């Protein structure tokens, strides 16, 4: 097995939205904001090469939305999903599986694209199976008013219409373990992978950044923040007990971290670049 971080670009979001009820005087110590109160965030995915399978975990925002849409998110940087995949010597048609932690647009938007004449949508990865779970699929396709803007039907429905969607309940995904979390959205899946003698967890939005480690630091986007606290408590215990390495999808500065137990609860232990940790 070989794992590669995939950088799909960077974006900006309001610091208050990203840290909920936590005052700016506290969160800006780890995530400084610009003059518009916007903080920088990554769109970091993961590619796993395992025998004849090439598995992509999440796939960023994609590029099919309008200029107005992307204007809200201040995209920056030279990286993209396609350039990062091709830089590693792979082609989009080589991808065999697209595993989606959840179906918010910044996690699944890159999986569907316009066709050549922009009259319909097609799969970015035409030979891949797209993986979700039944509970989250229902949540995403029958969205509540709070979350509706994050579930874009053009990102989601074509997976099923094209016949490329599978649910993990129907055909178990045996490459890694799954931790389910319900606070950010319903039935978000956190993959935990055995790799080079270590256990590596892809954190999705359960832990957006190292700055979110303290328990009250919950995003304003989370639909049920009290459940997020329960999810985090369960996961933090698991992470510390099992010495998990946490791969951060949205942290602009930190790629992989570990946690330690302190009198104040779980706190950052080590931050390391993926390439320094895994050769």
Image (cartoon, rainbow, N blue to C red):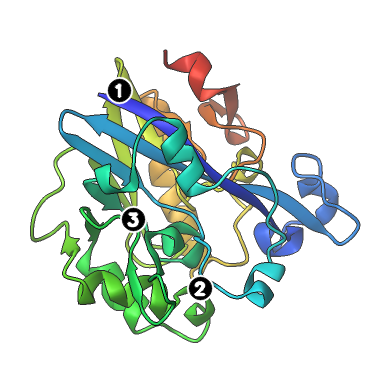
Q: Residue 189: image x %, image y %?
A: 32, 53
Q: Whole-percent x and y of residue 237?
A: 40, 36
Query: Do the residues bearing badges 2 and 3 touch, measured as CB atoms within 8 Å?
Result: no
Of the two numbered discs 2 and 1 on the same chain, state the one appearing first in sequence: 2
Residue at position x 48%, y 66% in the image: 105
Percent x, y of residue 126: 25, 58
Q: Which residue is mark 3?
A: 100
Q: Earlier in the sequence, mark 3 or mark 1?
A: 3
Q: Which mark is residue 195?
A: 1
Residue 232, placed above or below residue 227: above
The tag on residue 10 is none
Outermost residue toward the right in this view: 35
Q: Are marks 2 and 1 in contact (CB under 8 Å)?
A: no
Q: Which mark is residue 150?
A: 2
Is any part of residue 62 visible from this angle? yes
Q: Measure the C-alpha gap from mark 2 to mark 3.
A: 14 Å
């Amino acid at each position: 097995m070989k794992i590669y971080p995939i950088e799909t670009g960077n974006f900006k979001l309001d610091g208050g939205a990203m840290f909920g009820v936590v005052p700016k005087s506290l969160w800006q110590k780890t995530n400084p904001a610009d003059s518009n109160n916007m903080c920088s965030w990554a769109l970091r995915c993961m590619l796993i090469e395992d025998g004849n399978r090439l598995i992509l975990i999440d796939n960023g925002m994609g590029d099919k939305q309008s200029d107005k849409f992307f204007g809200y998110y201040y995209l920056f940087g030279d990286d993209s999903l396609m350039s990062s995949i091709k830089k590693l010597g792979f082609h989009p048609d080589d991808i065999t599986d697209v595993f989606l932690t959840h179906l918010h647009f910044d996690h699944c938007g890159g999986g569907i694209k316009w066709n050549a004449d922009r009259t319909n949508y097609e799969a970015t990865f035409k030979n891949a199976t797209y993986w979700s779970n039944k509970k989250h699929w229902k949540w995403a396709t029958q969205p509540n008013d709070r979350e509706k803007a994050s579930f874009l039907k053009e990102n989601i429905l074509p997976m099923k219409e094209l016949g490329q969607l599978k649910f993990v309940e129907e055909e178990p995904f045996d490459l890694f373990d799954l931790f389910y979390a319900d606070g950010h959205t319903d039935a978000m899946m956190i993959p935990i992978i055995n790799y080079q003698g270590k256990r590596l967890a892809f954190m999705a939005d359960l832990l957006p950044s190292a700055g979110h480690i303290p328990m009250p630091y919950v995003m304003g986007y989370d639909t049920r923040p009290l459940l997020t606290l329960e999810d985090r408590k369960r996961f933090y215990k698991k992470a510390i007990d099992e010495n998990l390495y946490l791969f951060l999808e949205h942290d602009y500065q930190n790629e992989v971290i570990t946690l330690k137990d302190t009198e104040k609860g779980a706190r950052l232990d080590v931050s390391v670049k993926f390439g320094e940790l895994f050769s």
